Every structure is written in C-alpha cells, then in structure tokens.
Amino acid sequence: MARIDGDTGPDRALAALAAIAAHGPLRAWDEGTTDLPWADPAFSERMLREHLDQRHDLASRRGATIERQVDRLVAWLGLRPGMSLLDLTCGPGLVARAFAERGIVVTGVDVAPAAIRYARELNTGLACTFVQADVRTVQLPAYAFDAAVYLYGQCAVLRPPDLRQTLARVRAALRPGAVLALEAREAARVDRGAGTSWWSGADDLWGVGRHLVLAEHGWDEDAGATVERYHVVTEATGELSVHGVTERALEPETLRAVLAEAGFPAVDLHPAWDGLTFDDAADWVVAVCR
C-alpha cells in the first residue's frame, strides 16, 4: 500500500493521478487487476453488507431471484432430497440455504471470512457445511458430490490455467453421472469499452471513513478479457490502495472446450436462464455439464 502525500485534498488527488499514470495500461491479470481482496477480513465485512442488501443484485442476488434460480437448478441437476451439492464461491450461504430447504445436503466453499461466518450462522440447523478456502486450492474429497454449482460468473475471473485446474478438481470430486451448473456472462454482453471515472464515498465497500475512488476500465484484446482497476485514496491518512478484477469473455466454443478438457464433454447451454425473469437475466448463460 502506497501513501499519497499532500497538504490538501486537491494535492492528494493530483498525486493519486500521478500514481495511476505510473501503473501503465490495463492488462489482464496484471498487478492491480488480478482480483479484489476477498480474503481480507475488513474488506469481506464490507462486502457482506453488499451481499445482504436487497436493493440490488451486485454481490448476491435478491431473495426472490435466488428462490426461482434454485428451483430451476434443482430440475437441471436432477437433485432430490438427501443428495449432496458442492457450492463453489458460496458467499454468505443464501443459495446454499435455498438448496438445503429443499432437502439437499450442501458443502459451500468461499475465501471470504465474513461470508463464511454469516453462512454458518444463517444455516444453523440445516444440512450445510461451509469451508473457508480459495476454490483454486481447496482440497475436495473424491467422488463425494451428486452435483455442483459455480454461479454468478466467478469462473471467468480466474486465469485460464487456474480455471482448468479448478474444474478438473471439481470433476474429480463429483460422483459418476453427477452434473455441474456453471454460470458465465454472455460473451456478447461483456463490456469491451474503455474509460475512467471517479467518485467520493465514506464507510462503504471501498473503505472506512472518507475516500476518493479513481477507476479505470478497459479491454485486453489478447486475453479476451475486460479489466478494471480501482485506486482508493483514504482522506485521513493519504494511503493509496489499488484493487482490480479481470473478467474473461467466454465465447460458447471456448467455454465448451474448457469444460471438455476438465472432463465435462457434454454441455447444454441455457441462455438467460431459459427465460427466467430477473433484472439482468439476458447477461448470463448457464452451462449444465456432464
């Protein structure tokens, strides 16, 4: 974490702009564009508020949407009461709870400590187990699950080698005949534009106290990915933190190839959740993989 020196707000803003310029152009999975600090305890507490906010679908979807999606997933996955499900990047356990209320035994994995704590509290008394771990490195038992879900496009933020390895380990954790439902953003809906923006805030996702956020957005043609980088300057201390995320645009043929390489040769694609109604349904496709 750097420090932005200056006696006044404008001085610090100018220094922050100079620091941004020094980072150079946006590149997929480069320094400052790899991932948000999900495992950081303070960040995960702030992100938990976003997960639970029923005014938007920016972190977790709203409760009514989750209920409809889980009904559809139960049908696609052929789940029955007593069967076991692996929920990758499970967040605060909202989806897991909906499955558990339908009689499914759920194991959720997420790297965020606040999300896992909340998931355990929320699902007390239900057939749910939650593991705080990175999906890229979590140790999964072999042939343990009847199905798996990997939702909300989280697969697309992984580097290609990490995604291949993660999916291969998921395949090894599934029983013969088990099904994976993987949700990705429709490649045609991925923003390939470029631009910058800024805003000020206080006590929100980006930090405690007042701060300035300077954001960059771009497209890396070589990687086929959109790249975002956020420079956050804390007013009280002048500290500058840099966060970012890369999201790959997974064309249908690329998605099928990645899944086949991981051991899922049969893939049925369901654009827009087959007509399920929610705010950004058209942005998503669900791959049901065997």
Image (tube, rainbow, N blue to C red):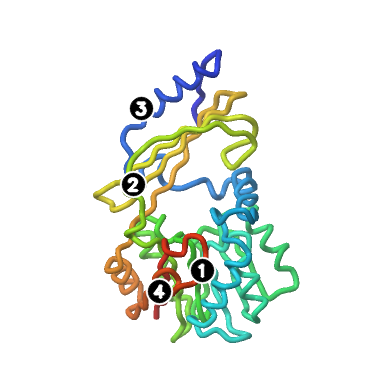
- Which secondary structure, mark 3? helix
User: Upstream in the sequence, badge 4 or badge 3?
Assistant: 3
**In the image: residue 131, left or right of residue 31:** right
State the separation of the CA atoms marked 3 and 1.
Answer: 44 Å
Q: Residue at x 50, y 22 (%)?
A: 4
Q: What residue type is labelled 2?
A: Ala
User: Upstream in the sequence, badge 3 or badge 2?
Assistant: 3
State the separation of the CA atoms marked 2 and 4.
Answer: 27 Å
State the separation of the CA atoms marked 2 and 1.
Answer: 32 Å
Q: Which amino acid does label 4 sit on?
A: His
Residue on which disc 1 sits: 277
Residue on which disc 4 sits: 270
Which image quarter is the C terminus in?
bottom left
Please identify, in this view, whether the residue under mark 2 or under mark 4 is nearer the observer.
4
State the separation of the CA atoms marked 1 and 4.
Answer: 14 Å
In the rendered image, residue 149, in percent from the top left (x then y), is placed at 50, 71
Relative vertical location of residue 157 with respect to residue 26 in this rendering, above or below: below
Please identify, in this view, whether the residue under mark 2 or under mark 1 is nearer the observer.
1
Q: Which of 32 and 7 is in front in this view?
A: 7
Residue 163 falls in image quadrant = bottom left
Residue on which disc 2 sits: 28
- Which secondary structure, mark 2? loop
- Which secondary structure, mark 4? strand
User: Residue extending furthest left?
Assistant: 222
User: Upstream in the sequence, badge 3 or badge 1?
Assistant: 3
